Amino acid sequence: MRPHAFSLGQTRRHFLRRSGVGIGTLALAELCQREAARAGNTPKQATHFPAKARSVIHVFLNGGMSQVDTFDPKPELTKRHGQRLPFDNLQTERRTGFALASPFEFQRHGESGIPVSDLFPHLSKCVDRMAVIRSMHAELPSHELSLMLMNSGDQRQVRPSMGSWLNWGMGSENDNLPGFIVLCPAGMPVGGAKNWRSAFLPGAYQGTRIDSSKSDPKQLIDHIQNPNLSAVDQKKQFDLLQRLNARHLAERPNEAALEARIASFELSYRMQQEATEAFDVSREPKHIIDMYGEGEQNRQLLMARR
């Protein structure tokens, strides 16, 4: 019998190096599993509830209307309209003197009987398909901390944003576009990029900001196109960059930030072809464009739909 190829005199370093050759099969298995999932050939895992969500769109109305004017009527506030509030130390961002009732009328709609103000005559018709949460509250009234609380669940600690959690948990079917997109017009919200941070999750799950105030899809992402280099020359540059990055990473293993930076370079290169097409709302049928209407916010929703 031929003796086993593994020699007792082999060092641990040689053994690990030879064993590491099989790591590539793990990557191949992951790719095959992903392709099979897209084709619907993977066995379904048992879950508490059937999974129906294919994507998540979070409409965050920075500076939008109050909940007391939309879906959360306050009868006591209406009762005390014009009266001084019976609180000695009311925690508000600015000094508050008298109660002010909502100027809008509320009516209950649908079988659920959810109250909706007359701000939403059309939305009230489909209120049974909505879930209105009234149990959430903030301990501090300042805008910056409230935005942190709204987007990451904590107003002080460094936590991943909701989009990062969803991106990490659901993944993305498109390898050439980020799984978490932030359609943010010119100017940043209070707190800036912290509102879509990935915190202790890998940096690849952080939100990618798109300046949706620009109508030209080629200008939505800064430096996505290089007008001075051809596609062939860019590919040569990218290949060289990847070799240098791989050499740099090999000397610094387990550096999550560095791995995320390299992954972002790879994604940016692949985005050159698909990003402009994905955000080009002119490709939508005319009746869809007419349905959404004109305006910056309307274009944002249409981009999210695409």
Image (tube, rainbow, N blue to C red):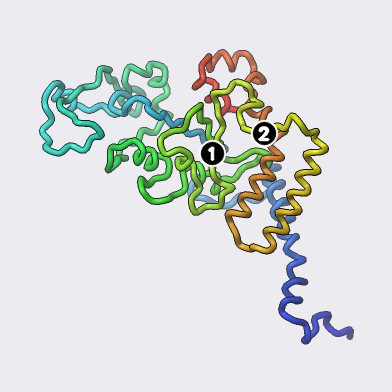
Callout 2 touching callout 1 (CB < 8 Å): no
Taking the image as shown, residue 254 lies to the left or right of residue 243, namely left
Q: Position of residue 81 (x, y in %)?
A: 15, 22
Q: Position of residue 137 (x, y in %)?
A: 29, 40
Residue at the limit of the structure toward the right, as seen here: 1
In this image, 198 relative to 74: left or right?
right
Name the one closer to the observer, 8 or 215.
215
Q: Is residue 258 left or right of residue 112?
A: right
The structure residue drawn at horizontal position 52% and vertical position 36%, both measured from the top left corner, is 56
What is the tally of numbered marks visible in this picture? 2
Residue tagged 1: 53
Residue drawn 27% across and 17% down? 104
Q: Is residue 292 above or below residue 60?
A: above
Say which element carries label 2.
loop
Q: Quadrant of residue 127?
A: top left
Disc number lying in front (2 or 1): 2
- Residue type at numbered disc 2: Ile
Give, as a three-letter code, the residue at label 1.
Ala
Of mark 2 and mark 1, the one earlier in the sequence is: 1
Say few, some or many: other residues with alpha carbon within 10 Å of mark 2 (under 14 / 14 to 19 / 20 or more): some
Disc 2 marks which residue? Answer: 224
Q: Name the residue: 31% across, 20% down.
A: 117
On screen, residue 176 above or below 198: above
Question: Which is more toward the observer, 233 or 69?
Answer: 233
- Distance between the alpha carbons at the discs numbered 2 and 1: 30 Å
Residue 145 image position (x, y, % from top left) = 35, 41
Q: State the mark number for residue 84.
A: none
Q: Quadrant of the C terminus?
A: top right
